[in-house]
Image: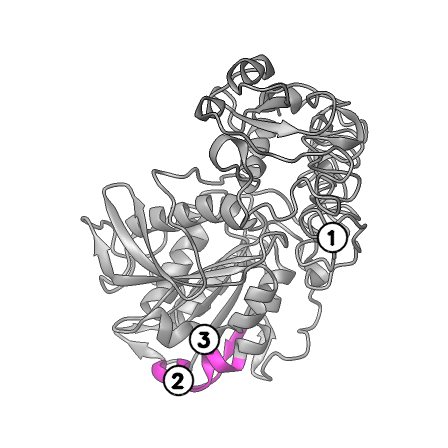
Amino acid sequence: MRTELLTATASLAALVSFGACGEPSASNAPGWGTASGNGAAGGGTASTTDSACNQCATDADCQTSCGDAALYCCYVATPGSMGTCYQLTSSACPGSSSAASSSTSSSGSGSGGLGGLGASSGFGGFGASSGFGGFGASSGFGGFGASSGFSGFGASSGFGGFGTASGSGGTRASASSSSGVGGSGSASMGAGSTSSSSGSGGGSGAGGSDPTTLPQASGACPTFANGSTVTVTAGAGSIQAQIWMGSSRTQGGPLILYWHGTGSSPASEVPIAFDTNAVASAGGMIAGFISSSRTGNPTGNTGDAVWYESDAIFADQVVACAIPQLGISPRHIHTAGYSAGGLQTVYMWYARSGYIASVISYSGGDATINKVAAQDPSNVPAAIAAHGAMGSDAIGIDFASASATWESEIKAQGGFSVDCNDGGSHVDFFRTRAPGLKPVSLKFFLDHPFKAPNTYTTLPSGFPSYCHID
């Protein structure tokens, strides 16, 4: 539990990025220390001039090195590493200067929290009435997702249920949520007002559980921006990915990992398969990988030598970087793809079941070559198998038959799937298959977070008439 708490603390700390000598980044911490921002109850202006302030282990280091009479406190984002000094307008440093020790404190520094981070209705309740030390308390870091939480991110108490009502950091309680990702909370970063706990996007699948195998970043992270093409480096290679996203970092939105078909591209497929504006509005991101940009020596062909098992490490890197950089919900990591990309999607359904919440395979399925042991056998990601008619949706592989095989495996493992047979050919992905599901593709993902029990007894409105619960 202590390891989980420290990991979650470090992840959230990355969301509150500090610039040189403790100055908060304007793009990541708007309003930090202002009357209406996160510092409402505890001060929190930051301005220093001494570069030595970038290195500290304790609050005392800051008082010695920063060179003036103002109050400086040491914030250690990652346990075991050096911290950064920041200046407060309050009268004392909040609790302990170390993120490691403060993660289990039950009191912190009172209503102000970490430089005002988490005033009673600040950063999703981050350290509300019990300060930074309130990690896991009923209104502290555990407020992530409570009624004044991170737009409904997570559970009703704790980061995905971390912590107990007493805020001691204790046990993983309340793993399910009453609001889920996509809640309509209006309190953004330091908004200073209580948000709604009702979920506007969580649908029937609100809640879920924390992923069992979240990856760690390997090397430098790319900087994600809407409309950009970023280079994702992992292992001994790299690949480019096209990005669709919004500007909000406070909504706990979904991440969709997309794999294109043979001879195609993300730009040709993503806009007809997903409402990219809706994904952006939900605080989410789509990363469409570009196979032709890959460097290195791929291994483990999952179809027709377009995608490989070794490409999963690029997905891991995007996941590891997007969660702290964009505030992506760990419970809402999804994958989709067409043809060769559909086969890669089903490979990910097996090989990354430790964090994949739900998937959509367009003309994919189980073709044997892309089948591996499940990373987390206890998680059977919800799925849509979209395909054409047997004998028509076929190029070397009969994708309708492969989809049927995969759906049988999902059912045998106690999972949930929706079959969408549009009766067309393989290339009807562009004409009917993807456009037909576009109105509901994001909703399906939001309704099926990681390990959430399915509540679809009938398909919601918007699904094509040829779809049915398998």
Earlier along the polypeptide chain: callout 3 or callout 2?
3
Q: What element carries label 1?
A: loop
Q: Where is residue 154? Give x, y as percent.
A: 68, 46
Three-letter code for the amino acid on which mark 2 is drawn: Asp
Q: Where is residue 209? Give x, y as percent.
A: 64, 44
Determine the image quadrant of residue 138: top right
Q: Residue 187 carries which label?
A: 1
From the viewer's perspective, is residue 125 above or below residue 275? above
Q: Which of 374 and 103 is in front in this view?
A: 103
Query: Is disc 3 in contact with disc 2, using a CB cutoff of under 8 Å?
Result: no
From the viewer's perspective, is residue 364 above or below residue 236? below
Is residue 5 covered in magenta?
no
Three-letter code for the amino acid on which mark 1 is drawn: Ala
Mark 1 vs mark 2: give the one in front.
1
Q: Is mark 3 on a helix, strand or loop?
A: helix
> How many numbered marks have been drawn onto this rendered protein structure?
3
